Image: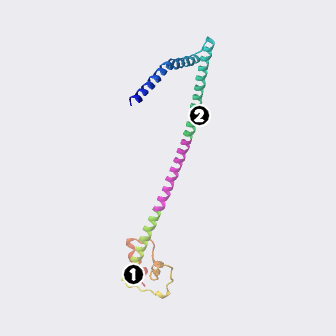
């Protein structure tokens, strides 16, 4: 057991001595490569320094020009989008005006329909009232000689032929005289 520990420690000592000998060589090479790399990046003469400055200016000018072109493209796109937005806004306004006109037409038709229904109800009530009144007064006309109009009660036809369309509250006596035999 002691023998194996002794062999291991001799191995570690040998490795340490070899590392101590090789470390300065490795370090010197790393320093040499780093210095060479730094010197390669620096210009060696005034001509090289001017050329390096000119190259930097040219790179800056190229990047500035690319940026200007990008800005010009973005402005053109923005102008195109604004034109499109204005055109669509005009279309929306036109459609809104058309919708308002259509709503006005719809409201007119609805008003006409309500008026027609109201007039129809009034006429039906008037005909029923006149029919009931003539029935109460005992009027019996010859139902066999009546001309039948489609959809109407045959007993209403004599009233329709003799009825004055401009019935007023004071005309009741004339209407009774016209409808009674």
Quadrant containing the C terminus in the rendered view: bottom left
Q: Residue 17: where, in percent of width, then height?
A: 47, 20
Q: Nearer the viewer, residue 147 or 21?
A: 21
Q: Nearer the viewer, residue 125 or 29?
A: 29
Q: Nearer the viewer, residue 108 or 71?
A: 71
Image-quadrant location for residue 138: bottom left
Q: Residue 136: where, in percent of width, then height?
A: 36, 82
In magenta, the rendered stretch is 84-110
- Crowd around label 1: few <14 · some 14–19 · many ≥20 (10 Å): some
Does the magenta-highlighted stretch encompass residue 90?
yes
Does the magenta-highlighted stretch encompass residue 95?
yes
Give the answer, above or below, for where 145 lies relative to 55: below
Extreme left residue here? 136
For image coordinates 37% across by 71% down, the residue present is: 169
Label 2: element kind = helix
Label 1: element kind = helix
Q: Which mark, residue 51?
A: none
Q: Which residue is mark 1?
A: 134
Q: Real-space Cα distance between discs 1 and 2?
A: 90 Å
Task: Characterize the magenta stretch by its predominant secondary structure.
Answer: helix
Q: Which residue is mark 2?
A: 73
């Amino acid at each position: 057991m002691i023998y194996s520990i002794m062999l291991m420690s001799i191995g570690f000592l040998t490795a340490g001595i070899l590392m101590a000998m090789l470390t300065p060589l490795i370090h010197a090479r790393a320093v040499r490569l780093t210095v060479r790399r730094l010197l390669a990046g620096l210009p060696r003469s005034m001509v090289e320094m001017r050329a390096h400055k000119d190259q930097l200016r040219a790179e800056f000018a190229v990047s500035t020009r690319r940026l200007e072109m990008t800005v010009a493209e973005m402005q053109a796109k923005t102008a195109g989008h604004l034109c499109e937005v204005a055109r669509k806004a005009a279309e929306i306004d036109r459609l809104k005006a058309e919708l308002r006109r259509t709503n006005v037409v719809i409201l007119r038709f609805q008003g006409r329909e309500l008026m027609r229904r109201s007039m129809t109800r009034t006429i039906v009530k008037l005909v029923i009232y006149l029919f009931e009144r003539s029935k109460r007064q005992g009027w019996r006309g010859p139902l066999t000689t009546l001309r039948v109009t489609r959809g109407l009660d045959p007993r209403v036809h004599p009233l329709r032929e003799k009825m004055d369309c401009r019935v007023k509250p004071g005309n009741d006596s004339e209407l009774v005289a016209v409808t009674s035999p």
